[in-house]
Amino acid sequence: MDRISHWVDNAVLTGTSGRTSPVTDPATGRVTAQLDLATTAEVDAVVASAKAAAVGWSQTSVATRTRLMFRFRELVEANRDEIARRLSSEHGKVLSDAGGEVARALEAVEYACGLAELLKGDYTEQASSGVDVYSMRQPLGVVAGITPFNFPAMVPLWMIPNAVACGNTFVLKPSEKDPSAPMFVAELFAEAGFPAGVLNVVNGDAEAVDHLLTHPDVAALSFVGSTPIARHVYETGTRAGKRVQALGGAKNHMVVLPDADLDLAADAAVNAAYGSAGERCMAISVVVAVGDVGDPLVDAIAARVDTLVIGPGDDPESQMGPLITREHRDRVAGYVEAGAAAGARVVVDGRDRVFDGDGFFLGVTLLDHVTPDMTVYTDEIFGPVLVVVRTETYVEAMALVEANPWGNGAAIFTRDGGAARRFQHEVTAGMVGVNVPIPVPVGYYSFGGWKDSLFGDTHMYGPEGIHFWTRGKVVTSRWPDPSTSAIDLGFPRND
């Protein structure tokens, strides 16, 4: 059986803790590897490697950093199928979906390749008599990322390229459920020529996470996961004096107005709810059907669900794979049971699907006439369950969206430009789609939610990512001119 350990100084560091965690193929239920779980001492060793590399890396020229980032981009492109295969085998998502994940990751890498432009400061000559003022952004030092199981390649690559391009060294703690893809990314980083210690990977569980959150040599930390853990990460990290961005959970709403293109809306709802078995923080989990669009929309979604092919991720015929673990599959099925018991109409019941073997498969579920007090509405299910809530008016639909504690993404489907413009202005969500169900921004914008979907004030990758991984410095400069020198204890004026 394979053993997966840590990556330090551009080489594998075998764990010594004796604690391991099984890595499982969700399509078969078979354990494929054992993952070493780091002790606090091993976390210290990884951070020490990053700290030793930080001074030299921060002083490396922008030209050199740019060349290395371009080399890394080419290696990711050349190995995109292998990255997709690795993440599919441990996560379970189908290969086409895994390939899409790698493609979106490449956008963030390509953005970081423009670091020469991104790190330019400002300069004002003669701001005051004989005085020039200019600004710069400098790296923080050692920074870290804690990433989720559902995007084991994309989310690390939303963090690492920008952080490293800015001159930081990086410690990655990926999910223990699917570590092979991020470990392979680290190998490609070394192959591109990045110096030892610039990118390190420490595998572990809560012990490793909590130590990174309080480690005195870690200056900043980015996290993606559930809202309760995001809150813990933010509060613990900031209490320790770190800069923290912690992206949490979601309950993304898709508002469908009566004038919407019904086929477009139904296709979008199916794609956004059931892609990757619903294990996406940007999945649509609630359709808000406004007015008389409800019945035909539910019928259209149900008709499309019947055609979905569910199977192993490496089967080219599969459109949806298994869930990540047996326990999570059973938890999702429990929500379907609770929704039915609470009075929701079960239009399609994923529990009725029977699958061969021991994989963690669950059919897709569609629940209609869900009310806001049901757990299928209040909780983040993170599985292939789509609920439909009905309202009479746009105003009622907006009130429903606004009352929800999460604000990751929201979408509206309509042919009315005025309604769409009003929605994008009023909705309290960080990412908004107009006739687009999963509005994940392109790599040169930034990703992040509002309300309980984000702790911290800075979004991920893109321009806000550059801001997060650097700190500003302003220099006020005057070269000596004896004729203008004088004693003056007053507050400096700009004359």
Image (cartoon, rainbow, N blue to C red):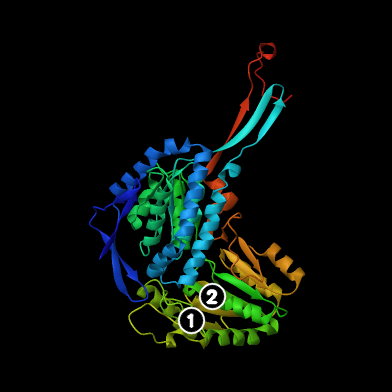
Mark 2 residue element: helix
Left or right: 409 in relation to 211: right
Task: State which quadrant residue 355 falls in.
Answer: bottom left
- Residue 86 seen in this snapshot: yes
Residue 405 in percent (x, y) is at 56, 65
270 lies above or below 71: below
Label 2 environment density (alpha carbons within 10 Å; few <14, some 14–19, many ≥20)? many
Residue 364's mark?
Answer: 1
Horizontal arrangement in the rendering, residue 415 relative to residue 4 (left or right): right
The residue shown at (53%, 39%) is 62
Between the residue at mark 1 and the residue at mark 2, the CA separation in whole angstroms equals 9 Å
Quarter of the image with the C terminus is: top right
Comes first in the chain, label 1 or label 2: 2
Amino acid type at circle 2 is Ala
Which residue is depicted at the point 69% across and 31% down?
A: 124
Task: Pick the residue in front: 224 or 456.
Answer: 224
Neighbour tally class for label 1: few under 14, some 14-19, many 20 plus, Cα within 10 Å: many
Q: Is residue 135 above or below residue 325?
A: above
Label 2 near label 1: C-beta < 8 Å?
yes
Q: Position of residue 441 (x, y in %)?
A: 60, 60
Location of mark 2 (residue): 273
* SS at mark 1 in the image: loop
Residue 209 place in picture, x, y as percent: 37, 54
From the viewer's side, name the closer residue of 301 and 190.
190
Please name the amino acid that badge 1 sits on.
Val
Percent coordinates x, y for residue 458 in the rendering: 56, 51
